[in-house]
Amino acid sequence: MSNFVVSARKYRPNRFEDVVGQEHVSRTLKNALQSGQLAHAFLFCGPRGVGKTTCARILAKVLNCQNLTKDFEPCNECSSCKSFNENASFNITELDAASNNSVEHIRALIEQVRFQPQQGRYKVFIIDEVHMLSQQAFNAFLKTLEEPPPYAIFILATTEKHKIIPTILSRCQIYDFRRIQVQDMVAHLQHICKTESIDAEEDALHIIAQKADGALRDALSIFDRIVAFSGKKIIYQDVISNLNVLDYDYYFRMVDALLVEDISKVLLIFDDILRKGFDPELFINGFAEHLRNLLVCKDEQTLQLLEISDTLQARYFEQSQITPSAFILTALNISNDCDIEYKNARNKRLHVEMALIKMTYVNRAIQIARQPELVGEEKKKPDGELEIGNRKSEVGSPRSEAGQQLPATSDQPPIVSDQESITYSYHEPPSNEATPSLFAKAKNSDKHSMPKLSGGLNALLEEVKGEENNNGKEDAPELTLEELTIAWQQYVDNSEQPDAVKILLQDAALHLEQKHIIAIANSSLAENAIREESGLIEYIRRYFDETELMFSVKKSEKKQTASPPKPLTVKEKYLKMRETNPLLQELQSRFDLRPDED
């Protein structure tokens, strides 16, 4: 059996200045010792592995040190320090509240408080994981914690401060420990490597620090495992393979393939990632983090936010300069939507591949948004390579038909909205010779504004085809009630609906209020028929070339006519006649006449 000691114990700090990443706690405790304003109860709280128990032990050692240094650090040479280092000090008591959390354990602790220290000035009680104490144990501890003897010091440590009752919190001086930063961890690991004569790459140590997630103890445990795997030389590839971390190079290659719209390479890179055993969800989350880092690198002032090595930071900065901000933001939206819907997808791989395919054509959609005439210039080369105008599809500012660079309105392409960013779909334009002329017509028309990208290229082609079928009209008719009635009737005549539905559509009364069309139906059946005719309003908009036309359907509010009166019976007719001519009553009685009951 070897005498190996793990790094977390071997390199545990013995002085305040050796504590990593908690300078605010060390300075406060030193100032309290210097001024003599030392509290009788401390509460150290924070995440795991950040130095709470270590600082408690250093403070306990300093309180009984016989030869304090000028900066109030323990000397580690006096009898008190030596006995503490050998775990033989009678003045320091440690209690693990996770396994000693009953009232009896606290009462035994209180009994020890009654005895004065045999050596030194203070008797220090360190209670670790104090939040594990029971409610009864807390109550039994209250009075002693509030008014202890002058020689008793209590140091409580916990990772879950919210579980401690307020009466305990109010009796302690609280110190919040921070998560340790990646750079501080890397510096500490480099110091250990230098002491142990281990050759370690900086990128490898950064991966270990990031995997530790702010806990130095976790970083040291991972470091020991990597040393056992690699020996005296720690390289980046060994670390990522041992920790099952996806290499940064995959993300850089993926972005490069997306920028040049190489969909085959994109899918092959993703397939290689899956073959290495990585989960698709891990990849999409890591890729979103990569895009976030590229966005941060856009500005040199925010470059310091990246907790990575200098070499990797320079690589991020280089790629961020050739990646448009619009592409990054849109790809981030697609990645976020993919992550949200990932758990509901049955085919996980296809779900992620569809997100990557959307990202592939983001730049093309942005270019079309800036220069819609480029759509008509797309053509297919014999070898299958797609060109726009006289150049290949690439990232950069759009160019004219002659290949000259067009003046850009800003340094970056326009940022596409969130709704547009997830609806891009690419369809190759049909091999129709009339297509370029149609787009040229759309370009030269003053009435046509920049097309929206919510439907992709296919929707743009459909819109142009609709203009071609507009009976060859160069100018759209003026929007009047008369023209509206004509357009409405044309749609009904050309509709493939049954005759019964056409009758319902024809009977609607039309009203026009500026650009608001109101159709008044005579019945609920007609109202439903008009509402379900989804192509009607689109036809009218194309007819008048008015994309902002509004359309609503209302039911007629005319009151129904009263039903005809019920016919009178023979007896009712006789009674009515008798009211107007009383002589009928005399005639009836004289001749004993009786009217029919019908």
Image: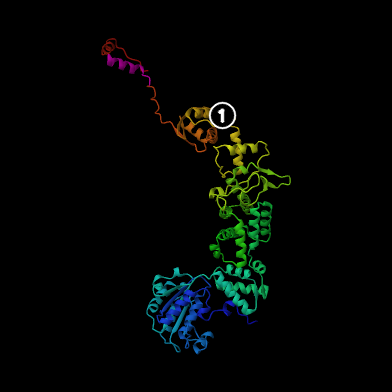
Q: Tell me if mark 1 has few (under 14), some (14-19) or many (20+) residues whose alpha carbon lies within 10 angstroms of its own.
A: few
- Percent position (x, y) of residue 586? 26, 12
Residue that mark 1 sits on: 498
On the question of residue 67 being in view, the answer is yes
Q: Does 511 sit above or below residue 225?
A: above
Q: Which residues are magenta?
A: 566-580
- Image quadrant containing the N terminus: bottom right
Please say whether residue 565 is one of the residues in the magenta stretch. no
Q: Does 214 sit above or below residue 264?
A: below
- Percent position (x, y) of residue 511? 45, 31
- Nearer to us in this view, 580 or 91: 91
Q: Residue at x 65, y 81 (%)?
A: 2
- In-image side of 587 versus 319 (left or right): left
- Percent position (x, y) of residue 443? 59, 39
On the image, which quarter does residue 37 sit in? Answer: bottom left
- Nearer to us in this view, 384 or 37: 384
- Nearer to us in this view, 402 or 173: 402
Q: How many marks?
A: 1
Furthest residue to the right? 383
- Image quadrant containing the C terminus: top left
Q: Secondary structure at mark 1?
A: loop
* Mark 1 residue type: Pro
- In-image side of 476 versus 102 (left or right): right
Secondary structure of the magenta portion, mostly? Answer: helix
On the question of residue 88 being in view, the answer is no
